[in-house]
Amino acid sequence: MPGVRELLRRSRSDLLLGAGLIGWIGLVLMLDAVRSWTGVESLRQRVLGAATWLVLVLVLRREAPLVRAQTLIVVGLATLVEYTFSPLLHAYVYRIGTVPLFVPPGHGLVYLAALTLGRSALLRARPRIPVAVTVLVGACWAGYGVFGTARTDLLGLFWFGCLLGFLRWGRSRLLYTGAFVVVSLLEVAGTGLGTWTWAAHDPVLGVIGQGNPPSGSAGGYGWFDLYALLLAPRLLAVTGRLRSRRRAGRPGTVGSAGQVPQHLVVQLAVGGDGAAAERPVGPVE
């Protein structure tokens, strides 16, 4: 087993990238909270949104196609959830009254930050330790949300149960561990700065208490991760078949219209890591 110093050396790029993504998210939240921008709110939202999209595109350029597909699926699903539960149902409300433009690409950065932390050699060398720490911290937070505050956080307790399920039966446990770190920091920072505020009760039944933020937010976010891991290989297979058909229709090309390009076949087959063989990415469902 390599020593801690060697593991840190191997994990340097992933840990730096994860920290950089978390730092960018924090910077955007702080810039969004600056009150002196009030007179030019629309300009601020466009600048922060465009800059966050640019960061997401630049980071995705260095990732494998499977990771890109996973990230885009997270962005799509999270955007649908955002516009359903914030401006429509008011489960939580953003300071500006609608979903800020930086939020959709921000979900992609959150996923990539969780992925980079989870795939680092430091966590993968001793996976039981980060999983155990996640369970312990999450249990204490969920317990405090239910028994330690006047605002009973039943939603957080439910989401913590979801997180336990992902950690117990999921094949990418370190991804959910990374998500616990990133999403927890994001929720604490976002609600603390006033970027968004959670309602005291759920918007459907009106009886389920919600913390501000809910303690087990990472468990709710884990559903995005799960569907990204499940759907991304299928998305790549479909796009591969479409490309093959286009190539087959060109003069002078050889190949079957239903055949997936070889580079995608290789990447989908390498140990479930979700990356090409020359650059292991892991962990992927």
Image: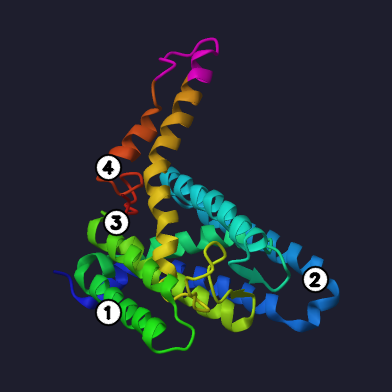
Instruction: Bin the neighbour count of mark 2 within 10 Å (Cα to Cα): few under 14, some 14-19, many 20 and up.
Output: some
- Does residue 105 appear in the picture of this structure? yes
Q: Badge 1: how crowded within 10 Å, few (<14), some, or many (20+)? A: few
User: Who comes first in sequence, dot 3 or dot 1?
Assistant: 1
Closer to the camera in the image, 221 or 203: 203
Q: Which residue does the image show at 53% across and 75% down from the upper left?
A: 23
Amino acid identity at mark 1: Leu
Name which quarter of the figure residue 251 lies in: top right
Separation of residues labelled 3 and 2 (CA atoms): 40 Å
Residue 4 in the image: x percent, y percent?
A: 23, 77
Q: Earlier in the sequence, mark 1 or mark 2?
A: 2
Majority SS type along the magenta span: loop
Point out the stretch of residues depicted in magenta: 245-258
Name the image quarter holding residue 120: bottom left
Residue at image mark 2 = 41
Q: Are marks 1 and 2 in contact (CB under 8 Å)?
A: no
> In the depicted view, which residue is nearer to us: 174 or 57?
174
Label 1 – label 4 distance at C-alpha: 33 Å
Label 4 crowding class (10 Å Cα cut-off): few <14, some 14-19, many 20+? Answer: some
Number of residue marks: 4
Query: Is disc 1 placed on a helix, strand or loop?
Result: helix
> Residue tagged by mark 3?
172
- Residue 14 seen in render: no
Q: CA distance from mark 1 to mark 2?
A: 41 Å
**In the drawing, what numbered circle is on residue 270?**
4
The residue under the point 32% across, 36% down is 266
Which residue is under mark 1? 136
* Residue depth check, mark 2 versus mark 4: number of the one nearer the observer: 2
